[in-house]
Every structure is written in C-alpha cells, then in structure tokens.
Image (cartoon, rainbow, N blue to C red):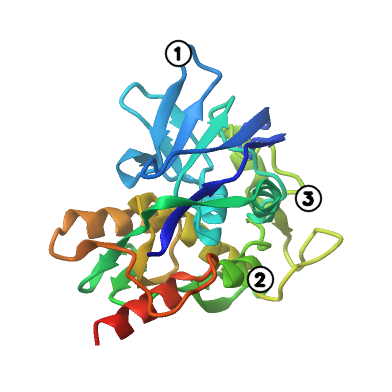
Amino acid sequence: MVKQRTLKQAISTTGVGLHKGNKVNLTLRPAPANTGLIFRRVDLDPVVDIPARADWVRDTQLCTCLINEQDVRVSTVEHLLAALAGVGIDNCIIEVDSHEIPIMDGSSEPFVDAIDEAGLVTQDAPRRFIKVLKPVRVEDGDAWGELTPHDGFLVDVGIQFDTPLIGKQRIRVEVTPDSFRGELARARTFGFMKDVERLWAAGLALGAALDNTVAIGDDRVINPEGLRFADEFVRHKALDAVGDLALAGAPLLGAYRSHRGGHRLNSLMVKALLADRTAWTIEEAPRRREVMHADAGFGAIAANYAADHS
C-alpha cells in the first residue's frame, strides 16, 4: 500500500506576518497516522487547535483564513499548506504563536526546505484520497472553477490582468512532489504598488516588503532581482490553488481548472465538491504491482490503481 507520511522530527522557523507585520514563530511537528493537518495556536491559554479543513474557511480577503466558532483564527495558511500537500505530508501539527503564518519569502520554498531538513517518515496506514467522480463547477463573477475526474492531481490555472506586465497567463501542472518543487514552490506572492496605501489604511499588507512580495509598478517589476520565472504570477496562483485545495482534508484525485480565480474561488470550489456527496468518494491508496519510491506522486499512484483494476 501507499502509506501516509509525517515528519521525521520537529522543525522550527521564524518570520513575519504579511498582513500585520508581527514576528511569528512556527514549529512543524510529527503527528500520528490519520491526524491530518492541524493548526495549533500555542500563544493562547489553553491552546486552540483548528483543523485544516474547508468548513473553517471564513475569510478569503487577500489570503485564506481559518476561523473557529470561538472566533480564533489562523491566517495566510495557503503557502504552508501548499508545501505540505505538494511534498505529500498527510499528518502534521502546525504550532504557531500568532494569528498568522509567517510569509517567509512569499513562496512555499522556505517551508519545503524546512520539511526536507526535518525529513519524512512513512506511517503504518494507507493514504486516503478524495476521488472526484463527476464534474463540479462554481462561478464567482467573471471567475470560474471546475473539478473533473482525473487519474492524478492536475491544476490548470489561468489569470488575466490589465497590466501588460502580466496580461493573460496559464499554467498546467500534474502535481507531484518533484513537479511542485520544480515548477511551483519558488513562485512568490505579488501585489500592485498602486494599492499599497489603501491596504495599509485597511490594516493589511503591513509586513509586505521586497524580500517577500513581487511589487508591480506602473511599467515594471520593482524588485531589483526581477522575476524567478517569466510567468511567476500564474505559477503563484497555481501554488495558492494547491494550498487551498488541501483544505478538502485529503489529497485529491482530480483535475482543477480555474479562470481568474483566487482564494475565494478555490474555497468555494472545495465546499461545492464536498457538498455534493455524489461527486466524490474516499479511496484508500491502491496496492501496487511493483515497488515505487515513497515520493511517487499522485499521478503515479492513480496510474497503478488503474492498471490494477483494468
């Protein structure tokens, strides 16, 4: 069986919150099989656990924010969740001493590096997937998203901005640990200089800086180092989608296509899928005809399943 995985050991890091600008300490800890991904607010007494699930998403303004029934929140969870889901971690306790996950460099790469430093361990329990059985579509203004059946986990993201620095961009990635590391993890969040004063007045983006955000001016990228990819903007949107879709509560076997989407659309998509009980099923990782490396991606897992059931 393809089995669940967690961290081999705990690892800690420190950064600032993107929107409030405060210092944040973060520790990722191993967790038993079938725990899932859980955020733990250790700055509260008693500590408060918030599961990484879509039913706790109650704010998507410029980030994904989980809020429980007592109004305890954890914000900007998407980049860390993308890292955990992207490299294939099923169980982890995420300790944080603030209401916001640190932004680091604006991408998932620092989290992936921390995970790689901690190492991974296989657990004695099969992975469970949410398998999409039929198309589910959501629309939100001029944005739309759709989940369809697929033997693997595919993200197909399109964006469109008026500025010629971005314009229309699209990326299609079969998400595996290797492809996530190579194609998505390094893509940074971005923002427009013209919006800065409005955001600051609203108490947002107070921690934004050129070392954690791609800043877009009227006719150029402000960051001295430029872009990490020519299409870094759409790659980051795809990274966000991987993180937001992880809030389904288990890795997806399906294809997600979105147009002009963001955190709100991604959240609506997950909630629409889970609300239609005929659109998905829980499937345990299949038995394999031949041994695969523990880092094999969802696509390879699904391909073996198809071969076993042909």
Between disc 3 and disc 1, the foreground one is: 1
Res 294 visible: yes
Q: Nearer the viewer, residue 291 or 254?
A: 291
Taking the spot 70% from the left edge, 43% from the top edge, the residue there is 208
Residue 40 in the image: x percent, y percent? 48, 29
Dot 1 falls on a residue whose secondary structure is loop
Residue at mark 2: 182
**Up-down: is 255 above or below 96?**
below
Q: Is residue 151 visible?
A: no
Q: Is residue 50 above or below residue 275?
A: above
Query: Can you tell which mark lies on residue 210?
Result: 3
**Which numbered disc flags the more N-terminal residue, 2 or 1?**
1
Q: Nearer the viewer, mark 3 or mark 2?
A: 2
Amino acid type, mark 2: Gly
In the rendered image, which residue does mark 1 sit on?
46
Label 2: few (<14), some (14–19) or many (≥20) C-alpha neighbours in 10 Å: few
Q: Residue 135 occupies which quadrant of the picture?
A: bottom left
The Cα–Cα distance between marks 3 and 1, rounded to whole angstroms, is 36 Å
Q: Residues within 10 Å of mark 3 (few under 14, many from 20)?
A: some
SS at mark 3?
A: loop
- Compute the Cα span from label 3 to label 2: 23 Å
How many marks the image carries: the answer is 3
Query: Residue at horizontal 71%, vertical 72%?
Result: 229
The amino acid marked with disc number 1 is Pro
